[in-house]
Image: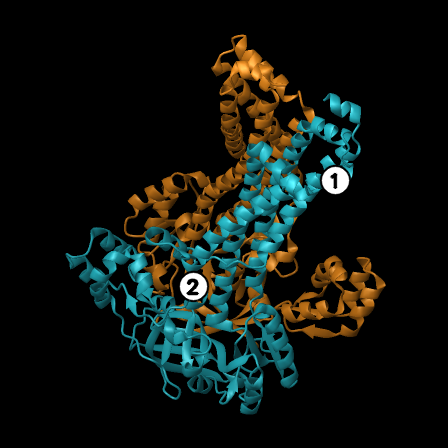
């Protein structure tokens, strides 16, 4: 009979102890994996929001622009360079932008805003700003209609009042905020959609007109068709001033940007700042966004651009956010560390008892001629099997939950959603799919078990046969 | 008697009991200490908000906060002030004007909120003036014929008012601070160079220093190279009372540093008398009253009485002004509890296992006890008590160690300087002083006892199921 077989049978001699020890490992693995998944998922979600609706993964800028974001630090839109960049295997599209700061006003209301000159067609490759246009809004008029509709349940009406003035870029979020389940949706959503429908128009290159962020539009009390005045400093300290009609309202998933963004067609924006033909950045859409591939792409592109330019990666452009996530990540890991430490002691305790309990058995086995080495390896296998049982079952159950969570992220509705939004967060909890983070968790548990095994091994090799048999 | 037996039973197998006790100790210590660090960071955040940023209660025109329209003054200011001052619990009050505008220097511009304040009463309400960076001036204490503005450190950096440069004086004082010669040599080529921003300076330092050197000296070098030119200027542009764009050049009176990027970037304080002249407002025209209370606990009570006395105005307390802060303080308590429960659940597995072992090991003895007439209730409570003792001893040691460590670290704080940027962007200081309330220890004690009881149920039931005749026969 081989060692593994013996170890396996030994496990089931005291089924209860095996189960409890595995259960504690199961608990740790399950909890750690789910927590990591939620943590990584929320970082990914947050990074994606920022990267995909704002900075992009890679940008080519004037070498001084990042340190000093002024209009003088811009560079000429060089089509030759753009063609070269597009030849890179990982670059899908290059998106020209002109980004600056201005004071926006509507009569007495004034606010510092972020002016973004974009080519609306090209933004489809990156920020997809056209998808973020507001389609529905719970305006006071829409609320009035909702209140008067006798087909709508009271709860929906209450929630509609709570979310007054909220804007939506799609009907599913609207449905969630109003707490309407799918069954009821087909019945009442069409009428709610018709009450709340919001008319938006596009902006086009060459035609003066702006899109503004939803929060900003509320702050400045601006609606479609109103005029916004922008005042700033242009190229070489000229005065930049202009008035534009608001064509549309967009809602970005980043509250901090949503409350200050104004989109202008690129050429109109360059005209405003007296910087015709200049750009502050060329944002690049990439086909593969893995960290390593991005780094390689940055390296290749850095060789293409001239001394006047600088290539920036999303991590550099979002240092603060990266540092925040980093701190949060460390915090989460410390908590898991504490949890693992506790479990490690639990496992050690079990091993300790197991050894004491089987002292006599060990003695007998050695007395009838079993090699101590063989006994030790059986013990080791036994413990590893217990660990494996816990790891596998924990990983299995966690995986089921995680895979389900990836498909169906936790989306908060009603009052909880409102609270999240007030806090400046999207009311959504995303999971991160099964990945390399599994390996580290599993390694920790294996290490824990290996450390615990040290005790019985020492006991076996240092065993005094006579004493052991008498135990 | 049962108590004594249970206690003695704990120590029959010292090693085994100690393993459980130590694991409880570590779990409880880890949990409490982590909670204390988090709690400390949050309390510091709340303290900063109350003492330096917003105070306890704001009173303004009911539509002011929609868009800060300059025309929305507090009606009957004197009467309102009188009412506020007569309200019990109010410690001091100051009035402000608030205007949205833009701050420019030759190089850059930023959107800001300009607060027209009265330095004397402002000082009684908020302690912002205590955070003035040494060497940058003061909170409007020196007379000047120029217009003065008191701004945040981050805005000063953004507008290039604070710069970094390396010159002979910097090198000399670094020498005095006993920096190794090789670092001074590395810095020498930069003599006379000015850096446009903190970012470019830090980048340059990163490129010449090794990681080890950065850790040891980067902060010292930055402190020395940091430079602020006296009488720096900036232009503030805004819309006056008659909707006409206006502006003026302001000298920097001083620079404050409060570990909150958002606030530092956006709040510019100027003397109200200066602002009145520029905007055409009169001294009776104020936008907001800022109130500090004698005791934070009284916030809701005072808010309620102010609301009934001044129904026309918008009256908000700090939890309403900063709902994220309120949510954080309210939610975090629940989170602490959940965190401790998870740790205790992990500990429970260890305790269950040990107690199960205890029952199996003492099968014969338990059988004997039942045979000679010990009733089931007593057997059950004997085992339960042993389990509770195990967890309580571990818990007590864990709590004592936590208390000790919290006191120890609270003296100098824990400095997470590496994450400063991220922390300050959220309004937190990266220098944390752990703190936790006594009531939390009480909660944890209760949780520990409950854990002890719950994890003894299964083993104790096992003990009850023993058939005395069978049990007596086991070896």
Q: Earlier in the sequence, mark 2 or mark 1?
A: 2
Residue at the disc numbered 2: A255
Quadrant position of residue A218: bottom left
The residue that appears at 46% across and 71% down in the rendered structure is A53
Chain letter of disc 2? A
The orange one among the chains is B
| Residue in the foreground of this view, choosing between A91 and A199 | A91
**Is B284 placed above or below A284 here?**
above
| Horizontal side of residue B192 vs B475, given as left or right | right
Residue at the disc numbered 1: A374
- Circle number at residue B301: none
| Residue in the foreground of this view, choosing between A287 and B242 | A287
| Horizontal side of residue A298 vs B65, given as left or right | right
Q: Position of residue A318 (x, y in %)?
A: 55, 67
Quadrant where the C terminus of chain A sits is top right
Chain letter of disc 1? A
The residue that appears at 62% across and 70% down in the rendered structure is A292
Q: Position of residue A277 (x, y in %)?
A: 50, 89
Q: Position of residue B220 (x, y in %)?
A: 73, 59
The residue that appears at 46% across and 61% down in the rendered structure is B115
């Amino acid at each position: 009979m081989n060692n593994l077989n013996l170890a396996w049978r030994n496990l089931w001699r005291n089924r209860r102890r095996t189960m409890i020890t595995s259960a504690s490992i199961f608990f740790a693995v399950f909890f750690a994996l789910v927590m990591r998944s939620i943590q990584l998922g929320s970082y990914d979600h947050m990074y994606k929001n920022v990267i995909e609706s704002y900075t992009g993964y890679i940008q080519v800028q004037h070498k001084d622009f990042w340190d000093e974001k002024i209009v003088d630090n811009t560079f000429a839109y060089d089509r030759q360079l753009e063609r070269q960049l597009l030849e890179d295997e990982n670059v899908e599209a290059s998106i020209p932008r002109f980004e600056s700061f201005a004071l926006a006003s509507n009569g007495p209301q004034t606010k510092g805003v972020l002016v973004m000159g974009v080519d609306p067609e090209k933004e489809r490759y990156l920020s997809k700003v056209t998808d973020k246009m507001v389609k529905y809004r719970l305006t006071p008029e829409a609320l009035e209609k909702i209140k008067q509709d006798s087909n709508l349940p009271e709860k929906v009406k209450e929630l509609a009042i709570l979310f007054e003035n909220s804007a939506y870029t799609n009907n599913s979020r609207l449905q969630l905020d109003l707490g309407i389940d799918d069954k009821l949706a087909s019945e009442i959503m069409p009428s709610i959609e018709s009450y709340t429908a919001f008319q938006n128009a596009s902006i086009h290159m060459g035609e003066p007109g702006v899109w503004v962020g939803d929060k900003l539009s509320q702050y400045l009390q601006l609606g479609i068709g109103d005029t916004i005045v922008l005042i700033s400093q242009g190229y070489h300290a000229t005065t930049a001033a202009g008035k534009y009609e608001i064509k549309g309202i967009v809602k970005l998933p980043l509250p901090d940007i949503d409350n200050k963004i104004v989109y202008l067609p690129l050429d109109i924006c360059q005209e405003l700042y007296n910087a015709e033909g200049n750009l502050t950045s060329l944002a690049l859409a990439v086909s593969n966004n893995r960290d390593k591939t991005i780094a390689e792409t940055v390296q290749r592109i850095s060789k293409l651009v001239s001394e006047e330019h600088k290539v920036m990666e999303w991590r550099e452009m979002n240092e603060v956010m990266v540092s925040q996530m980093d701190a949060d990540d460390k915090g989460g890991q410390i908590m898991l560390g504490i949890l693992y430490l506790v479990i490690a002691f639990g496992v050690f305790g079990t091993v300790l008892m197991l050894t004491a309990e089987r002292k006599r058995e060990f003695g007998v086995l050695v007395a009838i001629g079993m090699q101590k080495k063989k006994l030790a390896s059986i013990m080791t296998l036994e413990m590893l099997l217990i660990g494996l049982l816990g790891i596998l079952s924990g990983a299995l159950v966690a995986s089921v939950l995680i895979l389900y969570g990836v498909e169906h992220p936790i989306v908060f509705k009603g009052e909880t959603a409102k609270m999240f939004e007030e806090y400046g967060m999207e009311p959504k909890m995303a999971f991160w799919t099964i990945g390399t983070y599994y390996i580290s968790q599993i390694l920790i548990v294996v290490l824990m078990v290996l450390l615990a095994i040290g005790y019985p091994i020492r006991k076996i090799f240092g065993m005094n046969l006579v004493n052991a048999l008498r135990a | 008697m049962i108590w004594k037996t249970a206690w003695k039973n704990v120590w029959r197998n010292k090693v085994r009991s100690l393993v459980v006790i130590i694991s409880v100790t570590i779990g409880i210590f880890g949990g409490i200490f982590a909670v204390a660090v988090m709690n400390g960071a949050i309390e510091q955040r709340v303290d900063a908000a109350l003492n330096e940023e917003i105070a306890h209660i704001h009173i303004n025109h009911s539509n002011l906060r929609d868009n800060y329209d300059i025309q929305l003054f507090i009606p009957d200011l004197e009467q309102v002030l009188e009412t506020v001052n007569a309200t019990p619990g109010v410690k001091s009050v100051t009035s402000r004007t608030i205007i949205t505008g833009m701050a420019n220097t030759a190089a850059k511009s930023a959107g800001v909120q300009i607060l027209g304040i009265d330095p004397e009463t402002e000082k009684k309400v908020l302690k912002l003036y205590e955070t003035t960076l040494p060497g940058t001036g003061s909170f409007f204490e020196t007379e000047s014929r120029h217009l003065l503005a008191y701004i945040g450190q981050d805005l000063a950096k953004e507008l290039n008012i604070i710069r970094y440069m390396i010159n002979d004086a910097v090198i000399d004082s670094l020498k005095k601070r006993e920096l190794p010669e090789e670092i001074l040599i590395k810095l020498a080529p930069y003599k006379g160079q000015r850096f446009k921003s903190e970012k470019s300076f830090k980048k340059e330092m990163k490129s010449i220093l090794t990681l080890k050197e950065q850790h040891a000296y980067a902060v010292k070098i930055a402190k020395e190279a940091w430079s602020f030119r006296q009488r720096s200027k900036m232009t503030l542009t805004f819309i006056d009372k008659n909707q006409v764009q206006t502006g003026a050049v302001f000298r920097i009176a001083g620079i404050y540093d409060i570990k909150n990027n958002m606030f530092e970037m956006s709040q510019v304080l100027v003397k109200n008398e200066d602002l009145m002249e520029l905007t055409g407002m009169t001294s009776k025209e104020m936008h907001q009253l800022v109130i500090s209370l004698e005791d934070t606990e009284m916030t809701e009570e005072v808010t309620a009485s102010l609301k009934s006395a001044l129904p026309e105005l918008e009256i908000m307390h700090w939890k309403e002004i900063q709902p994220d802060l309120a949510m954080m303080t309210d939610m975090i308590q629940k989170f602490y509890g959940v965190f401790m429960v998870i740790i205790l659940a992990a500990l429970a597995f260890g305790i269950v296992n040990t107690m199960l072992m205890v029952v199996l090991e003492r099968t014969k003895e338990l059988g004997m006890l039942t045979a000679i007439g010990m009733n089931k209730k007593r057997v059950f409570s004997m085992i339960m008590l042993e389990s509770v003792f195990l967890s309580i001893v571990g818990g007590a040691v864990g709590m004592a160690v936590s208390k000790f460590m919290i006191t120890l670290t609270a003296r100098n704080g824990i400095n997470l300087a590496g994450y400063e940027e991220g922390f300050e962007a959220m309004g937190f200081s990266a220098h944390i002083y752990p703190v936790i309330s006594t009531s939390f220890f009480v909660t944890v004690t209760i949780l520990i006892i409950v854990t002890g009881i719950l994890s003894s149920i299964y083993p104790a039931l096992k003990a009850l199921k023993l058939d005395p005749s069978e049990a007596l026969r086991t070896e």
